[in-house]
Image (tube, rainbow, N blue to C red):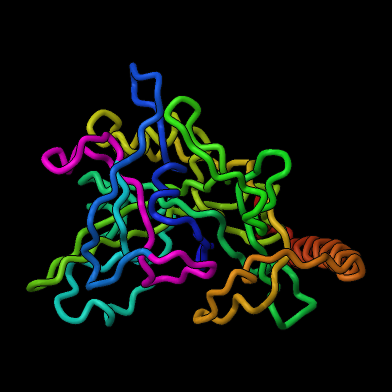
Amino acid sequence: MCGRSALSLSKSEIQCACSYKHKGVNTYIKPQWLPEHNDGKDYSPSFNIVPSDVTPVLVSGTKYRNAVKTSRVLKPMMWGIIPPWQKSDYKNHNISTNNCRIENITNSKLYGPILKNGGRCVIVVEGYYEWQTTNKATKTKQPYYVYAQQRAGVQVDDSKTWNNTYDDEDGWKGIKLLHMAGLYNIWENDDQIIYAYSVITMESNDKINWLHHRMPAVLDTDELIEAWLDIDNVPSYTALSLLKQVNILCWYRVSTLVNNSRYKENNCNKRIPEDKKDIKIQKTLNSWLTKRDRKQDDDNYQSVPAKKQKR
């Protein structure tokens, strides 16, 4: 996780979906949308977003005090941080930076300084795609669409059920977006200025580790979003400690059409029915593999001479 995502809302709809209440204010505020600086690329709605695509990202407005009136702003950014030591074509840095592991951030030559300098951001998506890596019975990895738990009646693969409405008193009533904690950096070279981000990932919890061993660091409350973005008052070590595994994620199987990074159509995230026979086979296989691994561990332990066994 995470190598593909989806976001089909327009710019104005995203502003509404990211609306929030500022301290001491009873009405909702829509974050201001800032101009792009991404080698001519701008955000384009897509059902199959890939690294190097540009998507809207929430950042603190304190870094743009002279340009904005809101404490949160939406900035189009490229997916995949460009290392600051890259001096030539940014496309040739040859480092996978679409994700950054939470366990390694503070000690990372790349991510450590970014975190220290207040490069915290929130990536907003309707959902992301994950390929099942735990099924040893098939050579073709099955893709799944993962999304936030929705209100009753909302189907994430049918926009007609979303009821995308907004007003200042009640806020956004449409589809609930996923808010993923991330880091961003600004890369400059000659006349090029590129804002780019990485998604923070962590070990999966028991709810979703059957699908993949990693999951994004999801911010599931507005209080967490506020704290993560508050680079002036919340130190980086405190902000990192707030990132926990969440239980709001839902999922379903989708077609392997999404495997093609150039395919962007709206059937990428369409639900396909689960094969009950495959599920039964997979559960049986997983059970057998677990028992086999435990037996191998026991056999390996017993094969160690008694005088060398640890007490």
Of residue 139 and residue 163, the one placed in the foreground of this image is: 163
Q: Residue furthest left?
A: 190
Residue that appears at 86% across and 69% down = 275
Q: Is residue 243 left or right of residue 121?
A: right
* Residue 14 in sight in this render: yes
Is residue 311 visible from the viewing direction of this image?
no
Q: Position of residue 281 (x, y in %)?
A: 89, 69
Foreground pick, 112 / 125:
125
* Front residue (pair 138, 23): 23
Instruction: From the top left corner, tell me how far across and down residue 6 is, in percent.
Output: 52, 62
Give the residues drawn in magenta, as a range.
44-72
Relative to 55, is 117 on the left or the right? left
Residue at 50% across, 60% down? 8
| In the depicted structure, whether residue 168 falls above or below residue 79 | above
The picture places residue 227, in percent across and down from the top left corner, at 37, 32
Q: Is residue 176 left or right of residue 55?
A: right
Residue nearest the observer in this picture, 20 or 250:
20
Q: On the image, which quarter does residue 109 sit in? A: bottom left
**Which residue is at a point 75% across and 75% down the rendered structure image?**
136
Picture coordinates of residue 306, whole percent (x, y): 73, 59
| Residue extending furthest toward the top | 24
How many numbered marks does the figure carry?
0
On whether residue 283 falls in the magenta region, the answer is no
Question: Is 52 a magenta residue?
Answer: yes
Q: Residue at x 9, y 72 (%)?
A: 191
Q: Quadrant of the N terminus?
A: bottom right
Say above or below: 115 vs 272.
Answer: above
Q: Is residue 218 above or below residue 303?
A: above
